[in-house]
Image (tube, rainbow, N blue to C red):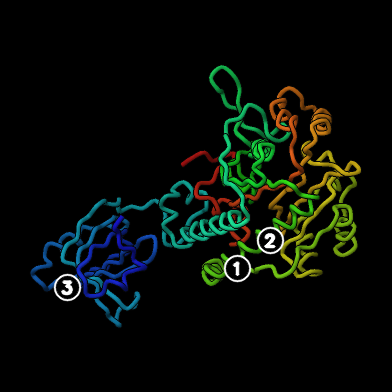
Amino acid sequence: MNKIFFKDLEKYYDKEIEISGFVENIRNIKWVQFLVLRDSTDRVQVTIEKSEEKNKEMVELVNTLTVESTVKVTGTLKKNENVRLRGMEFIPTKIEVTSESDPELPINIHDKDAQLLDQRLDYRWLDLRNEYNFNIFKIQSYLVKVMREFMYSKDFTEIHTPKLIGAASESGSEVFEVKYFDRKAYLAQSPQFYKQMAIASGFDRVFEVAPVFRAENSNTSRHTTEFTGFDLEFAYIDSYEDVMDFEEELLTYALDKVNVKYGDLIKELYNKELIVPKNKFPRVKLADLYDILEEKYDYKVDEEEKNDLTTEGERLAYRYAMEEFNSEFIFVTDFPKDKRAFYHMRKNDVPQGYDLIYRGVEITTGAQREHRYDVLKKQALEKGLDKDIEFYLEFFKYGCPPHGGFGLGVDRLTMLILDISIKEAMMLFRGPNRLNP
């Protein structure tokens, strides 16, 4: 716990200290040896003069040292304007190899484009040593931190719901079935049922950051079988527009915070500008959107396809939002009931919910939930759901306030902010054809 991080080395000039890290580079020339060490925060140069007798043992050690080994180095940090790396160098008195790396690395960790992405994923623990990849997760971590920060500022309670459940949490399809002793169980598709249970328990405002499992046999640039969900639910709302307003506020706050801390890094490493929303997100009904897309972009789809938003429709909705409202976000509402979950409240038989599109990709399905027991039971029966959700219906038998909520995919949001693939936006990607490492 007393490790000195390289980003903080400026505090330790002319003091004898101990540093530890990976050996990123070795230059062994006639009179001197140079090591570049790396930790999770920065790099530093270690300089060893070969001509000094006291350095003989260290010189011999460096002669056999391999890159990506880890070392512990004792010595003194000195300012040196001639050193291109941060204008400093570390003069060692002792080097200890704490682990040796095989000299033959299976991938080029300094050039992510030197091999195919799937090959890199086979050696993800090495791939993540690349600055481009490592910083994805520094940014993602901070994104989740500030979203959590926002939730706590709004008096939400963070909860942790089970991921082994006795009934499918959505429609019964696309679930992973597991053997649970003498009966079947499922991996949770979302914490939906238990978020609503918390509302029925009187919690008022809850959220969760946790794994979500979807048995979708999709090999696309944005689908995955396991991802991290940021889910929330809150009570005493008047309509699903309250839910949209809250998501808009959450995302504006989070993107602003990320931009302040990492906006320059995102531009430099990922060649993408993080744009913080300045106005309300536009809102459009699904049927109206298809009319607009046909009129503006000559985009036509068959009538049966108009009951949901197509992938191309999402992309063009983004184009329309940018051209008409200068917004990277757009809410799409009024989906038909056959495309929405049974627990979405309906008004005049229209589900009171929405999809949120960001940079041409759907990132959220949100809604006001049906909280009245008799109506909810009727809507469940319409979808062919009966015995397997009896436990869920019980939550609403004894009073439950009007409420709504939504879920965001942390990985997909990261993917869109940085303009990378979903495989890169996850520390360890899971898809139909990948279960390792």
Does 250 appear above or below 191?
Answer: below
Residue 216 rendering spot, x and y as whole percentages: 66, 38
Question: Which amino acid does the dot numbered 1 rest on?
Answer: Lys
The residue under label 1 is 272
Observer able to see residue 310: no
Front position in the image: 33 or 55: 55
Left or right: 307 as drawn, with respect to 329: right
**Neighbourhood count class around disc 3 (C-alpha, 10 Å): few under 14, some 14–19, many 20 upward:** some
The quadrant of the rendering that contains the N terminus is bottom left
| Gap in angstroms between the C-alphas marked 3 and 2 | 57 Å
Residue 78 rendering spot, x and y as whole percentages: 24, 76
Dots 3 and 1: beta carbons under 8 Å? no
Q: Secondary structure at mark 2?
A: helix
**Neighbourhood count class around disc 1 (C-alpha, 10 Å): few under 14, some 14–19, many 20 upward:** some
The residue under label 3 is 49
Q: Secondary structure at mark 1?
A: loop
Single out the mark in the foreground, 3 or 1: 1
**Nearer-N-terminus badge (3/1):** 3
Q: Quadrant of residue 246?
A: bottom right
Front position in the image: 318 or 69: 318
The residue under label 2 is 249
